[in-house]
């Protein structure tokens, strides 16, 4: 009994000391590898005796902590005991990098291959282990009915080529190669989609029909794809028989019905979503059938039906479409639904206003690639003209949609910037006249003349010859005038420039005297941070990549010593982590913020190309450490990748007194398995976790993107928190890059959620990049300036509201920070922004309730975007009790 008791106690102690998978994942995510090493015995026990979950957890930890020996042990067990192809291949890869006896290696390979029963699996492993010939693996692929992950990855590489190929002939050749090489791939439906796309685009209707006959109904997704092509007016005109084509499409849609999750292209649809997609296509068939009775195909203008009982048929069609309930508009589903409701309503002359409202709803939701925008707006204009409405089309549509909210007016033409493809935006009062001026792309300077008019002073300001792509204002020598740092991709000595403001009208290059900050790297973004708290802001520069030459570069930190700049990148710790140099990351944005309320701004750096993000914390006067992994700001680790992060912005959107974060990620659907979507991260403050006796404290950020009402977009680029309607809650504006992709303006509902008001607010721009806000006309409302490839925009805020605002300008004067709140005096005080200053305004509303608003002055956000150096507080109809500078 004594020995039994000892054994039981020993087992219990092992169980108590054994680290859980959840805790090990936590330590790996936080990169607390030194803490994990305390549990090395427990971790090794998982490898030797654990189940599949144990092995996968330890493997992830081993890879992230750079322990190839431990990873090899996990991979072998996963391969041999659980037939994991990914683990087997990773074992083969890692085994090449460690010393291993050749005979033992062959023995292990033989054991691993023997663990797989499928002939294709064996062929793949032998191919990679023993450098097999292509014919061997090709034959195995051709004769296999189901592929492993390795073969599907090979198939996807061809699909990725097909999806970006514009030439019909080249694409069709690739598709033929795909069918030959991977006849049973799960990506066959994508090949089929592009096959019909290119055949119809090339008007090769015989081949088009042959493809349908061969593949048209091999799966529910194939049937759906076939139906959408048969429905198209272009195809139906070629067969010259509406009824036959539509009947065939209807039958295919029946075949497409399924109670299982379906993958269409790269998107996954739940059974409910899938049924709704089919229902919408059936409604389109019914629409085309109805107009077909009158000889229309659907691509004509002014479609009119005269069939008997047409009004009943139209109302039935509308009811049919209204019953379709999509859960979100991530792929433009709701925009598509309301567009077709508008088309259906147009068939009845009595429903003109309802049709306009439907088209308005389609535009309100918006869709990728501007799919319905032009036709929906043209329809609204036609109805507006037909009904002889006296108010403007936009004013009328807002009225019939009962919209009363944020409104912007595009004044780009009057400002003489329309059509000028400026990319980045910085706002500041460079000539000390109290008005906010605009710097585009680091060199095009527009002076504010008042009344929303601007004068191009680029040449007069001596900026014409700069090779810059972006720039930021700051008074780097604390003489009371705004200077400029210009960013550049130039590598021949004409890159970054410190441009000193001479007299409020002209700038001169002082690199030679103040410090040569030209790093000859492709500098993409920067920010000013007053690390010493003396009013001399230092400069962090994020460097990008050279396409197909170098995947990243180290960033630079230039310490400002009373107007003179010194490279402290290495000494201050910015190049200490292995991932920051040789080659470095592809930096896109810099966004400083004091999110942990200690009085010092952290430096968030957003990196592209699926790289990790940085977040530098100043731990003493001269040292910075990257706390991004500890605080969950690297992005989400997926198979060694993170996100295509572009820009970020901080703001207290929930008014709880700390700064929340939005990170914009470019997220192509075909790469979502390894990349991040854009994220709204709510700051939930200090948290802790106990891991086997170790109390670990960290700042908690919670991803609330979906619950807050922020929809997925593939191409988000640069976010901006600002209070557009002076209600005290920060709204969110996001640009999206690429031709025909739309921006977003989300109005803060005051309850932690947002509503998309972009189109109705007049804030929809396409192919946007940098953006910034400031009260350009001093009317108390924040205006927007947006850089974009198709011509920059100035959006004048003309919102009709009784809400009031106050503006506070934190500045350095006589070596102290002053909070100037009298706008009339802005021209009389030094233009020396006190970056990092946080100011809390205490307010009382008419009901007697007291509350606070917090804002912090930051020098940059997004991708080298800069708001005016002023703090804006929408106060509604509340009264100000106290204005106070925050001190920790």
Image: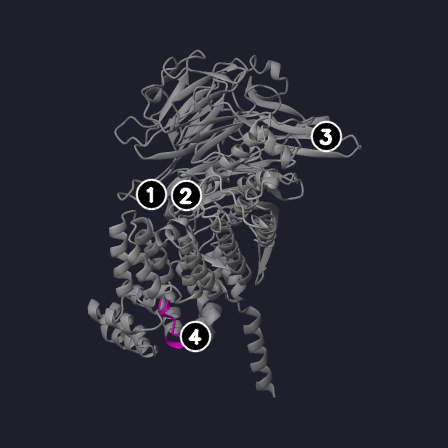
Q: Earlier in the sequence, mark 2 or mark 3?
A: 2
Q: Earlier in the sequence, mark 3 or mark 1?
A: 1
Tag of residue 154: none
Q: Is residue 4 above or below residue 558?
A: below
Find disc 1 in the rendering and name its residue: 552
Q: Earlier in the sequence, mark 4 or mark 2?
A: 4
Q: Earlier in the sequence, mark 4 or mark 3?
A: 4
User: Residues under labels 1 and 4: Cα distance?
Assistant: 39 Å
In which quadrant is the N terminus drawn? bottom right
Secondary structure state at the residue bearing disc 2: strand
Classed neighbour count for the residue bearing mark 3: other residues with Cα under 10 Å, few (<14), some (14–19), many (≥20):
some
User: Residues under labels 4 and 2: Cα distance?
Assistant: 38 Å
User: Residues under labels 4 and 3: Cα distance?
Assistant: 62 Å
Pointer 3 with pointer 1, Cβ within 8 A: no
Find disc 3 in the rendering and name its residue: 843
Pointer 1 with pointer 2, Cβ within 8 A: yes
**Residue shown at 63%/17% (left/top)?**
822
Give the residues drawn in magenta, as a range.
Answer: 80-87
Q: Earlier in the sequence, mark 1 or mark 2?
A: 1
Among the 4 quarters of the image, the one containing residue 512 = top left
User: Residues under labels 3 and 1: Cα distance?
Assistant: 47 Å
Find disc 2 in the rendering and name its residue: 607
Residue 587 in picture, x, y percent from top left: 39, 40
Classed neighbour count for the residue bearing mark 4: other residues with Cα under 10 Å, few (<14), some (14–19), many (≥20):
some
* Residue 82 is a magenta residue: yes
Q: Nearer the viewer, mark 1 or mark 4?
A: 1
Tag of residue 48: 4
Secondary structure state at the residue bearing disc 3: strand
């Amino acid at each position: 009994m004594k020995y039994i008791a000892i054994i039981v106690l020993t087992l219990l102690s092992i169980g108590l000391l054994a680290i859980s998978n959840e805790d090990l994942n936590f330590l790996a995510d936080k990169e607390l590898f030194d803490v994990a090493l305390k549990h090395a015995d427990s971790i090794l026990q998982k490898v030797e005796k654990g189940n599949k979950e144990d092995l996968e957890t330890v493997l992830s930890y081993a890879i992230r902590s750079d322990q190839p020996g431990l990873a090899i042990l996990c991979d072998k067990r996963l391969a041999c005991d659980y037939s994991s192809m990914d683990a087997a291949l990773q074992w083969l890869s890692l085994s090449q990098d460690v010393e291993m006896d050749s005979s033992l290696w062959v023995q292990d390979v033989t054991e691993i291959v023997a663990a797989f029963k499928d002939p294709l699996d064996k062929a793949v492993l032998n191919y990679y282990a023993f450098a097999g010939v292509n014919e061997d693996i090709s034959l195995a692929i051709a004769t296999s009915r189901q592929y492993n992950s390795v073969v599907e990855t090979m198939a996807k590489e061809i699909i990725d080529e097909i999806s970006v190929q514009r030439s019909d002939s080249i694409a069709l050749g690739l598709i033929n190669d795909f069918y030959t090489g991977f006849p049973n791939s799960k990506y066959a439906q994508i090949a089929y989609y592009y096959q019909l796309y290119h055949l119809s685009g090339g008007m090769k209707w015989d081949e088009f029909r042959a493809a349908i006959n061969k593949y048209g109904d091999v799966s529910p997704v194939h049937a759906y794809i076939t139906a959408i092509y048969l429905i198209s007016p272009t195809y139906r005109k070629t067969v010259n028989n509406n009824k036959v084509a539509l009947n065939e499409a209807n039958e295919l849609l029946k075949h497409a019905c399924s109670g299982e999750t379906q993958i269409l292209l790269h998107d996954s649809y739940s059974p409910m979503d899938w049924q709704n997609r089919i229902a919408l296509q059936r409604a389109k068939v019914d629409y085309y059938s109805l107009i077909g009775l009158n000889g229309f195909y659907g691509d004509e203008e002014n479609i009119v039906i005269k069939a008997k009982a047409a009004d009943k048929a139209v109302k039935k069609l509308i009811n049919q479409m209204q019953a379709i309930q999509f859960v979100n508009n991530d792929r433009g589903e709701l925009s598509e639904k309301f567009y077709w409701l508008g088309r259906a309503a147009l068939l009845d002359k009595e429903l003109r206003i309802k049709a306009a409202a439907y088209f308005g709803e389609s535009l309100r939701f918006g869709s990728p690639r501007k799919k319905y925008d032009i036709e929906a707006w043209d329809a609204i204009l036609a109805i507006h003209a037909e009904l002889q409405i006296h108010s403007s089309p936009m004013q009328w549509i807002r009225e019939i949609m009962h919209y009363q909210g944020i409104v912007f007016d595009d004044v780009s033409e009057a400002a003489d910037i329309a059509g000028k493809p400026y990319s980045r935006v910085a706002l500041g009062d460079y000539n000390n006249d109290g008005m906010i001026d605009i710097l585009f792309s680091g060199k095009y300077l527009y002076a504010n003349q008042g009344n929303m008019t601007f004068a191009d002073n680029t040449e007069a300001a001596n900026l014409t010859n700069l090779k810059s792509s972006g720039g930021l204002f700051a008074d780097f020598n604390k003489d009371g005038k705004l200077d400029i740092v210009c960013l550049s991709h130039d590598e021949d000595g004409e890159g970054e420039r410190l441009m000193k403001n001479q007299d409020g009208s002209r700038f001169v290059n002082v690199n030679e005297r103040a410090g040569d900050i030209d790093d000859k790297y492709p500098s993409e973004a920067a920010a000013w941070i007053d690390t010493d708290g003396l009013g001399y802001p230092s400069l962090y520069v994020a460097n990008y990549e050279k396409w197909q030459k170098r995947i990243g570069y180290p960033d630079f930190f230039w310490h400002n010593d009373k107007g003179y700049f010194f490279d402290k990148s290495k000494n201050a710790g910015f190049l200490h982590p292995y991932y920051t140099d040789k080659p470095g990351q592809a930096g896109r944005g810099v966004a400083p913020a004091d999110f942990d309320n200690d009085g010092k701004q952290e430096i968030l750096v957003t990196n592209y190309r699926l790289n990790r993000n940085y977040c530098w914390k100043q731990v003493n006067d001269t040292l910075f450490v990257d706390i991004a992994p500890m605080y969950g700001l690297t992005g989400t680790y997926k198979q060694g990748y993170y996100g295509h992060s572009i820009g970020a912005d901080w703001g207290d959107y929930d008014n709880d007194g700390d700064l929340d974060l939005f990170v914009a990620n470019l997220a192509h659907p075909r790469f979502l398995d390894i990349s991040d979507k854009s994220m709204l991260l709510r700051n939930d403050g200090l948290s802790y976790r106990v891991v086997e006796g170790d109390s670990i404290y960290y700042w908690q950020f919670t991803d609330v993107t979906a619950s807050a009402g922020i929809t997925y977009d593939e191409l988000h680029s640069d976010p901006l928190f600002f209070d557009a309607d002076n209600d005290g809650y920060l709204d969110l504006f996001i640009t999206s890059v690429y031709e025909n992709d739309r921006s977003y303006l989300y109005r803060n509902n005051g309850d932690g959620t947002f509503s998309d008001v972009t189109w109705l607010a007049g804030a929809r721009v396409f192919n946007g990049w940098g953006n910034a806000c400031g009260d350009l006309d001093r009317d108390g409302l924040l205006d927007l300036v947006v850089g974009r490839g198709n011509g920059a925009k100035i959006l004048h805020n003309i919102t009709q509201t009784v809400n009031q605002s106050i503006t506070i300008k934190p500045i350095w004067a006589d070596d102290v920070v002053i909070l100037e709140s009298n706008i009339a005096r802005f021209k009389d005080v030094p233009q020396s922004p006190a970056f990092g200053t946080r100011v809390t305004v205490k307010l009382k509303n008419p009901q007697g309730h007291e509350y606070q608003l917090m804002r912090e002055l930051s020098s940059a956000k997004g991708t080298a975007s800069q708001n005016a150096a002023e703090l804006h507080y929408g106060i509604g109809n509340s009264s100000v009790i106290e204005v106070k500078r925050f001190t920790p």
